[in-house]
Image (cartoon, rainbow, N blue to C red):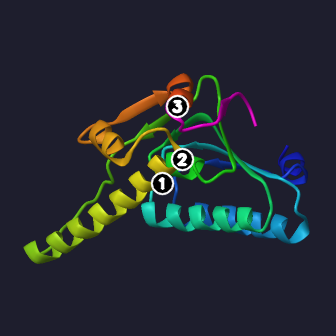
């Protein structure tokens, strides 16, 4: 099955978004990028994870697209938190009929002196604004509406809601 996925240029991103999972995905995408301009599919079933590591993968996917390679992103099961942001990186974004996405504010575990925690809070707010910008750019919702909907709560959407609000382009399988 893994060989079939490799031959068909399908990457299954399962598990946490971390430095190692983002690097593994980028390494595979880099190899496929060198081999041909054939389309690539990335299927997410992930609880999310590191925003910084996720943004590095997000930027890499965009660079693959800029090279003229069509990238389809898909979620089967769920794309929570940072994985929902990664779903937005595709030329075409697909949600499984029974898939869900999760949108919420960026989490942080700031510790230290008060001034250090204030600096961390400023940085986390900037990250949150960046992610809201990504979501609003690809959806039918504005920044304020997304911020208000996700403020202080987890916002789960099924495929129909994701399609209606523009967080995916179609329902089905990729």
Going 84% across and 48% down the picture, which residue do you hit?
A: 5
Tell me the residue that label 3 is attached to. Answer: 162
How far apart are the two marked residues, 3 and 1, measured between alpha carbons? 15 Å
The residue that mark 1 highlights is 134
Q: Position of residue 36 (x, y in %)?
A: 90, 65
Residue at mark 3 to residue at mark 2: CA–CA distance: 11 Å
Q: Residue at left 43%, top 39%?
A: 141
For the residue carrying disc 3, how many other residues have a C-alpha within 10 Å: few (<14), some (14-19), or many (20+)?
many
Label 1 – label 2 distance at C-alpha? 7 Å
Spot occupied by residue 155 in the image (x, y as percentages of width and height): 37, 34
Which quarter of the figure is the N terminus placed in? top right
User: Which secondary structure, mark 1?
Assistant: helix
For numbered disc 2, what is the local secondary structure? helix
Instruction: Residue 46: say if magenta.
Output: no
Q: Is residue 163 left or right of residue 73?
A: left
Inspect this view and state whether residue 24 appears: no
Vertical relation: 136 (above or below) 149:
below
Circle 3/circle 2 CB separation < 8 Å: no
Circle 3 SS class = helix
* Left or right of 12, for residue 86: left
Q: Which residues are magenta?
A: 165-174
Q: What residue is pinned by disc 2? A: 138
Q: Is residue 1 visible?
A: yes
Q: Residue drawn 76% across and 70% down?
A: 30
72 is higher (above) or lower (below) than 101: below
- Is residue 163 toward the left or the right of residue 10 in the image? left
């Amino acid at each position: 099955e893994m060989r079939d996925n490799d031959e068909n240029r399908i990457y299954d991103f399962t598990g946490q978004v971390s430095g190692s999972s983002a690097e593994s995905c980028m390494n595979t995408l880099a190899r496929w990028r060198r081999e041909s301009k054939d389309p690539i599919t990335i299927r997410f079933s992930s609880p999310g994870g590191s925003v910084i590591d996720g943004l590095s993968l997000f930027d890499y996917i965009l660079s693959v697209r800029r090279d003229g390679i069509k990238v389809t992103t898909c979620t089967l099961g769920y794309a929570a938190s940072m994985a929902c942001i990664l779903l937005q990186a595709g030329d075409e974004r697909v949600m499984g009929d029974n898939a869900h996405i999760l949108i919420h504010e960026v989490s942080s575990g700031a510790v230290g002196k008060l001034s250090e925690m204030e600096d961390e809070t400023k940085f986390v707010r900037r990250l949150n604004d960046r992610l809201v910008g990504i979501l609003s750019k690809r959806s039918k919702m504005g920044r304020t509406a997304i911020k208000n909907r996700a403020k202080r709560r987890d916002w789960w959407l099924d495929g129909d809601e994701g399609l209606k609000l523009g967080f995916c382009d179609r329902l089905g399988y990729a």
